[in-house]
Amino acid sequence: MIVDLSVPISEDTSVYPDDPPVSVRLWAVIDRDGYYMNVLKMGEHTGTHVDAPAHFVPDGKTIDEMPLERFMGEGLVLDVRNGDGKIRLDEIPDSGYYDRIVLFLTGGRELSPEVALFLVAEGVKAVGTDAMSIGDEAVHRILLSEEVPIFENLVNLDSLIGRRFTFVGLPLRIEGGSGSPVRAVAIIGRD
């Protein structure tokens, strides 16, 4: 079974404050042009997307320089919706993160720098959140300086709690990109 973890892209897609709005304009129609096509205009961090180190780290790797292996692997969802404020270390298990893609079901909460440092020390492959942002600038710098990709604006994470799954969120190969929209999915095997 495959679970779609991505928000739809349209002119109604919410964007981070001060980011460019999404524009979808008709370019060609079959009756007139013999084919159908739209023109898209949006920021790299629109909808469900992944941040590359270059987004916050001077001279950090751009999205096209990151190894594709960083965008797929064994996933884990942590449900931290019941807490208040920034997500703290005492709200998450103290092990089981090495080489995994850790996704936070937050209800809009952000990671604390302490949690980001812990995840880096544990050797996570990537992190993600259902929120528009994983956390403040410090959290982004901690993760991205260690080349840990950050997935944001994920949906349907509640259907993955306690399940074994493979996460896949491949970016577009944007030369010099600070990030990229992704079509993130969870591939659920037999439990």
Image: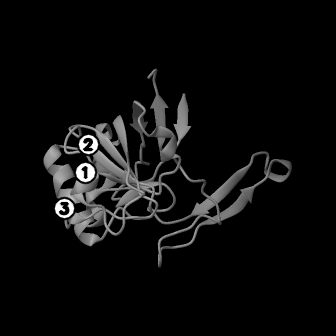
Q: Amino acid at mark 1?
A: Val
Residue at image coords 26%, 67%? 56
Of mark 3 and mark 1, the one earlier in the sequence is 3
Say which of 51 and 27 sits in front: 51
Q: Residue furthest left?
A: 121
Q: CA distance from mark 1 to mark 2?
A: 6 Å
- Neighbor class of circle 2 (other Cα within 10 Å; few <14, some 14-19, many 20+) is many
> Is residue 183 among the parts visible in the rendering?
no
Give the residue at mark 1: 148
Say which of 191 and 60 sits in front: 191
Residue at image coords 64%, 60%? 10
Quadrant of the image occupied by residue 122 = top left
Q: Amino acid at mark 3?
A: Glu
Going by the image, does 158 lie left or right of 178?
Answer: right
Q: Nearer the viewer, mark 3 or mark 1?
A: 3
Q: Position of residue 163 (x, y in %)?
A: 43, 32
Going by the image, does 164 lie left or right of 125?
Answer: right
Going by the image, does 115 lie left or right of 44?
Answer: left
> Is residue 32 among the parts visible in the rendering?
yes
Q: Amino acid at mark 2?
A: Lys
Q: Which labelled disc corresponds to residue 125?
A: 2
Say which of 154 and 81 sits in front: 81
Give the residue at mark 3: 114
Q: Position of residue 64 (x, y in %)?
A: 33, 50
